[in-house]
Structure formats: C-alpha cells, structure tokens
Amino acid sequence: MQSIGPRDAHKGGVDGVKVNTESPTSDVGDSKKSNSEKLIVHLIISFRDLCVFTLFLPLGTLFVCFVSAYIFQPDEVHETHCRVYNVIPSISAITGVSPQRYLWRISIALHIGPRFIIAFVYNNYYRTLINELNDPVRMKKAGRLLNVVYCLNLVEISALCGVTYISNKENYPLHEKVFILFMTSSLSYMLATLKLLKTLQPNGPQTSQEDSSLRYKRAFFALSIASTIGLIMFFMKHRFFCHDLAFSWFALCEYIVALSNMGFHCTTMLDFPTEDFMIAKNANRYRKHQASISWKLD
C-alpha cells in the first residue's frame, strides 16, 4: 500500500483519489447552522377561516343584539324623535342600549384587527398583479387606483370603529357624521375595487373562482347602492315629515346596507381560498418586499 505524505495530502490525494482534509467539527457546525436557519412555524391559520370569523362575529352579534333588545327593551329601541309608530329598530338603537352596547363593542374590537390584516393582504395581492402587467400606462393607472382602494379601505374600517364607540345617544351629531363617512367610504371602496379589477383584467376573470368573486362583488355593490338610496329617502321622510313606519323602512334599508357590506368583504374567501396566515421563525429569507406590511403609498 502506498503511503501518503503531508505534501500529497495537501494536494488532495494520490492517483486522483480525493482526500477530505476538513475537520469533522465543521460538519457539526454546518448542521447546527442549518438547523438554526430552518423555518419554524409557531402558528398557522387558514386565511379563509380568518375571513369567516371576521364575517360571522359581527353578524352573529348583531342578531343577538336585535333579538334581545326587541324582546326585553322594546320601548327603548323603538323610541324616535317623532314619536310615531315603529316596528323595526335601527342598528344604532339595538347597539346603543345596555348591555347590548358592550357586546357589540367587544365584537367590533375583535373584528377590527383581522379587517386591517385583510386590507394589507389585498394591497399586496393587487400590487403583485400590477407588477405582472406589461402595459406601463395600465400599470400606472392601476397603481393609482390601488392607492385609492387601500386608503378607502382603511378609512372605512376606522369609520366603523368610530360609529361603534361613539353612540348616537351620547353624541348624536358626531355619530351621524361618522356614519356618513362610513357609508361614503364603503360605497367608494366597492366602486374603486371594481374599477381596479376591470383595469387589471380588461378581458374579464381568468378562472371560474375569479368570475364568481367578481359577480358577487357587483351584486353586493348594486344592492348597497339601492338600499342606500332607500335609506336616504326614508330618513328624510322620517326626519322632516314624521311619516308612520318611515323609520322602520329606514332601519330595514340600514340592515340591508350592513349585510351587503359584509357580503362584499366576504368575497375574500373566494379570492384567497387556499392561503394561510402564518407566524414563523426564520421567515426573513422567504419574505418578499411586496409581501410586507407597509403604510407607504407609492
């Protein structure tokens, strides 16, 4: 057997045989380093389930507030400034009495956090679609629309928080103004979203799921517009003419507006059917610039 001297070993071996001269401890170090860089998931939640929770939390709470207030506090929730006959209390009435107001406020407090997360996700999702466009003019137009959509979404969520915690019985003038802001930002957000989708997909949706999502968005937007017109008309009849049941029709339109708004936002489940919300360690190398939460509007 031929012996290998120090010089031969330094060259890498004899007769083309490669000799490993690295220290065994280097493999252990590399192993520890790779283990420290592994993706460790602490929590993973279906984004669809998060959206379902965000929808049914206020919907279920609203139903409980309506039933309990209607049965146990009819005089308080049916009272209006005109003192006319009324059969359907408004949302502000059933969530403005105690203890329903506390239940509703807790519900909205739990509802607001996921709503902001969904807004951030939509912003990054649309931003990715914009970056895939080949037309610079369409990219610029879509980018501007996205900024509008993003801002309106944040304003709508903030206005919902304001109209919840500023009761009509505590400060009616401010409650009324915040409610108008919520209605305006909500309808404007729906319209801007539909215009953005039209800009991103001028030839229509590419998949059946996208087509269903768009059809539901259009239907809920149309229903919101129709019920808002009825809401304004019946509010004027109640406020200035004190017609019987005018406030009841106003309240009915208000419920339809609320359900339409929830339905429009419920299409998130169609837009993100298989995505997951994840909290993990060592996720830096998986994070993309366009997938990070940012308040910057460019």
Image (cartoon, helix red, strand yellow):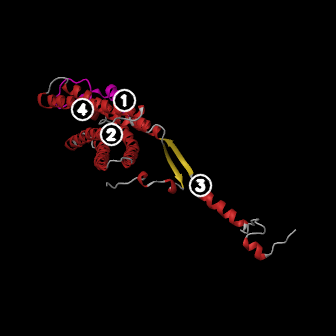
Position in image of residue 291 (x %, y %):
43, 51
Is residue 42 shown to the viewer in this render?
yes
Instruction: Give SS at disc 2.
Output: helix
Instruction: Give SS at disc 1.
Output: helix
Residue at image mark 3: 38
Position of residue 138 in the picture relative to residue 233 (left or right): right
Give the number of marks: 4
User: The residue under label 4 is which amino acid type?
Assistant: Ile
Nearest to the eye among marks 1 and 4: give it: 4
> For the magenta stretch, what is the residue range?
61-89
Seen as rendered, the residue at the extreme right is: 1
Instruction: Give SS at disc 3.
Output: loop
Q: Check whether the beta carbons of the residues at disc 1 and disc 3 lie within 8 A of each other.
A: no
Which residue lies at the image location 35% right of the left edge and 27% below the top edge?
A: 67
* Camera-nearest residue between 144 and 237: 144
Which residue lies at the image location 71% right of the left edge and 66% below the top edge?
A: 25
Q: Residues within 10 Å of mark 3 (few under 14, many from 20)?
A: few
Between the residue at mark 3 and the residue at mark 4, the CA separation in whole angstroms equals: 50 Å
Between the residue at mark 1 and the residue at mark 2, the CA separation in whole angstroms equals: 33 Å
Nearest to the eye among marks 1 and 3: give it: 3
User: The residue under label 2 is which amino acid type?
Assistant: Leu
Residue at image mark 4: 225
Position of residue 237 in the picture relative to residue 56 (left or right): left
Q: Residues within 10 Å of mark 1 (few under 14, many from 20)?
A: few
Which residue lies at the image location 21% right of the left edge and 43% below the top edge?
A: 177
* Sequence-first tag of 1 and 3: 3
* Sequence-first tag of 2 and 3: 3
Between the residue at mark 2 and the residue at mark 3, the CA separation in whole angstroms equals: 38 Å
Seen as rendered, the residue at the extreme front is: 15
Q: Is residue 65 magenta?
A: yes
Position of residue 271 in the picture relative to residue 233 (left or right): right
